[in-house]
Amino acid sequence: MITHSSYTVEPWSLCERSLNLDVLPQSESVFALSNGHVGWRGNLDEGEPHGLPGSYLNGVYELHPLPYAEAGYGYPESGQTVINVTNGKIIRLLVDDEPFDLRYGRLVAHERTLDLRTGLLTRVCEWVSPAGCAVRVRSVRLVSFTQRAIAAVRYEVEALDSEVRIVIQSELVANEQLPGTNGDPRASVALESPLESESHFAADGRLALVHRTRTSELRVGAAADHVVTGPRPTTTGCESRADVARLTIASALAPGDALRLDKVVAYGWSSTRSLPAVSDQVDAALAAAMSIGWEGLVDEQRAYLDAFWARADVEVDGDEEIQQAVRFALFHVLQAGARAEQRAIPAKGLTGSGYDGHAFWDTEVFVLPLLSYTSPFAVAEALRWRQNTLSAAKERAAQLGLQGAAFPWRTIDGSEGSAYWPAGTAAFHVNADIADAVIRYVAVTGDGRFERDTGVELLVETARLWRSLGHHDHHGAFHIDGVTGPDEYSAVQDDNAYTNLMARANLLAAAEVVERHAKTAAALGVDDEESAAWRDAAEAMHVPYNDELGVHEQSSGFTQHQVWDFTGTRADQYPLMLHFPYFDIYRKQVVKQADLVLAMYKCSEHFDEEHTARNFAYYEPLTVRDSSLSASCQAVIAAQAGHLALAYAYVAESALMDLEDLENNTRDGLHIASLAGTWMALVAGFGGLRLLGSTPNFTPRLPERFSRLAFTLEVVGRRLHVEITAEAAVYTLVSGEPLTVRHYGRPVLVTPDAPERRGIRPVPVRPAPEQPPHRAPSRGGPHTRVRR
């Protein structure tokens, strides 16, 4: 747990009141700054001590061999791992020749604050050197949303009670030494000093390094410029070599004097551009940023975030921790995708190297729905990245003997990066997840040009896979056999309900879109026979059901399996995959993460209220939540089934996944999908949001802990504000033409003239379902974080 008394609960910021080195890696993730293109972990300015140094460029990776005990046809040959690129954060400080190192001397005070409204990470500390010299250091850091290549730091040192000699060393550093890894040793070897120097430069306060990765052959450039303000005399000097470029500043400070450094860093990379071109690229980005200076960058950042919060804020009255956590979640999801621009949105964003920096299906299922309503540009760009990787997905499908595209389960560059085929190759549902994101984005935005230029191709090639992967039986029913759904504890199963229902929607959407865009469809070789076959498969899609139990089966025969021995499983034996063989897990009724429950949310039109309640009651005691993706899905359906206290507990678990390090791996980076799931649990759970075509439908209900929930959505060019209390829901059109929404299924026309108020229906009373032993939601009693 990283929750301790030095972390405060505030509505618009996260503040660490003292430095705790035991949780330094976790705080580096929590305080990470990114814009989707450039990512800086929240490392201390001077570089040491550190948990995991991290400077990332989205899409920059190195290749390494994948381990196989035995060879097999169709196994991916190479893995991809995100690498730590040139570190531009480092600003070392010497006080009368003593290195400013918080492990030595006396730390009087240390505070870091992430301001969610400004996007600034501020650090203030007072330190007394071993020789007795006292200084105050204040730094402010940003990664720009408006200037994609830019990150910057303002660093200031003040002498407190005696004259001191100060030396500041501002550096660009490549091939930093990283902590050891517990993963594949071949990956570790591949990532040891992955950057080969191509050029270095230092003169007149400007620094530059250009490197190339050894195997993936990606060229990476970084450049920095500085503005120094201090008492006279203050001197500067520059030097560079292969992996380090340094500006050294020296000054003498009387008590009350300060030496200030503004450092602006520009990044760029390319797989094709020449060394001069990449150098010119970062130089140009640096010049543009320096032209407006530090204050200009800060002003642009605040204006960008003001606009974001106006369309995306979620207000929670009654729980200060959840209020802080949902804004923290929204901010980090924005950071992960805002300027990714035709690159993947990794599972950890650019906050750490967990999962090797890979993107998974959770991007489309958890992250893009949130961004569709708040930052739709980021969604279009993420899906264009999928379109740009179609050639790799089509090659993969052909390798597997299938038509269309088989998108990877985990990847950076578009090729499959998983060496474990039951969870990787067999997880074909990623195709339907991508299709679902396309369908939602077009419905929410009405972006017809995107549908024509990107959506048609993605829907067609994903539909082709389902038609070739599945088959009709002698009764005409359509089956998809041997796949892995979201629940990775039930691998290679027949007729996974989530996969089949999502594939059904994919097939129908493809058939409909080729009618709207006949010319584009013809260019892709689609004819009437093919689109009719998609419709036939969709209409005949088999969804397994147990008549005796009256519940839908997660996969065919799942309810006939032996139930896992939960009573014989100790609390310290979770997650199960680290303590039991997959062979044993796969043949039992035990669920890693919500699967059929997720299907009831994503494909809600196929489940009436009674089946939803029965299904949830059946699967809840089987679901162990060995995945950070599960709690938010369970929250949504728990709320729908009327279990509001349980839904609240799951919302808290999702919201506090990283702030309280509930899975003990926040050190490797934040759980971006779980953070997005916080929004989903609140808006789709307690707000009851479902999209019917392009019409939002709401079934609002609040838990006792909340006195009010309010959120804003952008739908087809309108901005809708929804406010929910225990008595009523109020729908207000903030901007745009009149909009029809549905309240418990009934149409409500919302106009600019006046808000529309509707009552809240009673919640059905049902017996509360139980969870497996030791697996109740993590939300416990009173927490220890200080409230301001």
Image: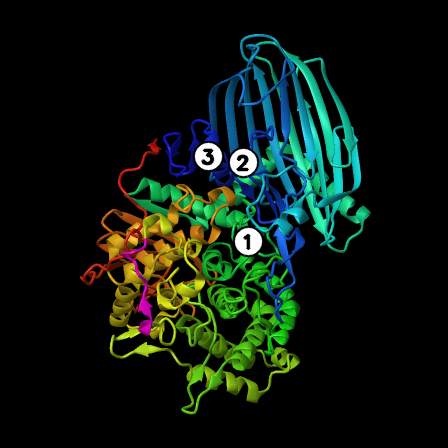
The crowding category of the residue bearing disc 2, from other C-alpha atoms within 10 Å (few below 14, some 14 to 19, many at least 20), is many
- Front position in the image: 504 or 728: 504
On the image, numbered disc 3 is attached to which residue?
A: 23
Q: Residue at x 42, y 73 (%)?
A: 496
Residue 553 in the image, given as x and y percentages of width and height: 34, 73
Q: Residue at x 63, y 55 (%)?
A: 80
Residue 701 drawn at (x, y percent): 26, 57
Depth check, mark 1 against mark 2: the one in front is 2
Q: Where 363 falls versus 162 (above or below)? A: below
Split into 4 quadrants, where in the image is the C terminus?
Answer: top left
Of the residues under marks 2 and 3, which one precedes in the sequence?
3
Q: Which mark is residue 346?
A: 1
From the viewer's perspective, is the residue at label 3 or at label 1 nearer? Answer: 3
438 above or below 275? below
Which amino acid does the dot numbered 3 rest on?
Val
Could one spot residue 747 in this view of the protein? no
Q: Nearer the viewer, residue 766 or 157?
A: 766
Q: Secondary structure at mark 1?
A: loop
Q: Is residue 726 left or right of residue 84?
A: left
Category of crowding for the residue at label 1, using alpha-carbon neighbours closer than 10 angstroms: few (below 14), some (14–19), many (at least 20): many
78 above or below 492? above
Q: Is residue 589 left or right of residue 355?
A: left
Residue range of the region highlighted in magenta in the rendering: 559-569
In the rendered structure, are the residues bearing label 2 and label 3 in contact, judged by CB atoms less than 8 Å apart? no
Q: Amino acid at mark 2?
A: Gly
Asked if residue 560 is among those painted magenta in the image, a careful observer would answer yes
Residue carrying label 2: 51
Residue at the spot x=46%, y=60% of the render?
369
Q: Is residue 366 left or right of residue 76?
A: left
